Image (cartoon, rainbow, N blue to C red):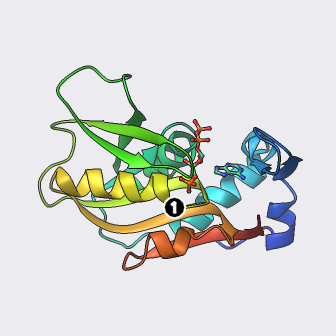
Amino acid sequence: MTARTMSDAELSGFVRDVPDYPNDGIMFKDITGLLVDPKALSEAVERLAALVPDDVDLVSGMEARGFIVGAALAFRLGVGFVPVRKAGKLPPPTRSLTYGLEYGEATVEIREGTVPAGARVMLVDDVLATGGTAAAGAELLEQLGAEVVGLAFLLELEGLGGRERLAGRSVSTVLLAGS
Ligand SMILES: O=P(O)(O)OC[C@H]1O[C@H](OP(=O)(O)OP(=O)(O)O)[C@H](O)[C@@H]1O
Ligand SMILES: Nc1ncnc2[nH]cnc12
């Protein structure tokens, strides 16, 4: 495993807090500064890689920021990447799952045939907040026959119930942040 080159505080320093975005009362965690800095990006991907069991077959990531960290992680691990897309972006055949958000609902999709039955899949995203997005991604992967061996996030927002929503699953995070 590659040694850490940054402390938690240094890596966290690349994440920008944006108050009242996209709605009043939301403290948005903007990871753009982390992505644009080569050392911070490398540190983040190495830390994510350290959270992944040895024998995964695939990494999967949630659109859109989960594609960035997930595809980098898949490349780092030498495995393929399965995108979990928002509704209406993938050509058929697809499998969809609609899930509840804090207000309203959303639908995610995976292209059928991308996940071999029994594949050991690590699901990745940038942020764990309420956990609804990741729970839907994991459930959809399982409907397609995958074994979801774990979920890894760059940033966990405490106090929003994400851990509880993913109870029973193996959840790990690189950084913790107040919400
Ligand atoms: O734990 P939850 O409450 O479900 O929230 C976490 C999700 O919210 C953000 O995605 P967003 O829908 O903002 O889309 P984006 O990645 O396209 O910006 C983030 O990238 C996660 O996917
Ligand atoms: N506060 C937040 N910042 C960034 N991404 C998010 N996804 C859900 N909540 C978020």
Q: Is residue 100 left or right of residue 91?
A: right
Q: Is residue 171 visible?
A: yes
Q: Position of residue 73 (x, y in %)?
A: 50, 52
Q: Quadrant of residue 154?
A: bottom right
Q: Is residue 84 visible?
A: no
Disc 1 Cβ-to-ligand 1 distance below 8 Å:
yes
Q: Position of residue 166 (x, y in %)?
A: 44, 70
Q: Quadrant of residue 6?
A: bottom right
Q: Is residue 4 left or right of residue 56?
A: right
Residue at x-position 68% and y-position 72%: 159
Q: Position of residue 112 (x, y in %)?
A: 18, 36
Q: Is residue 5 left or right of residue 10?
A: left
Residue at x-position 58% and y-position 70%: 161
Q: Which residue is mark 1?
A: 131
| Image vertical order of residue 59 relative to residue 37, above or below | below
Q: Quadrant of residue 151?
A: bottom left
Q: Is residue 95 left or right of residue 80?
A: left
Q: Which part of the image, by quadrant, shows the N terminus?
A: bottom right
Residue lying furthest bottom in this view? Answer: 168
* Three-letter amino acid code at the position of disc 1: Gly
Q: Position of residue 2 (x, y in %)?
A: 61, 69
Foreground pick, 79 / 151: 151
Residue at x-position 17% and y-position 49%: 144
Foreground pick, 37 / 96: 96
Residue lying furthest top in this view? Answer: 91
Residue lying furthest front in this view? Answer: 103
**Element carrying mark 1:** loop
Would you call the spot at circle 1 few (<14 residues within 10 Å), some (14-19), or many (20 or more)? many
Q: Which part of the image, by quadrant, shows the C terminus?
A: bottom right
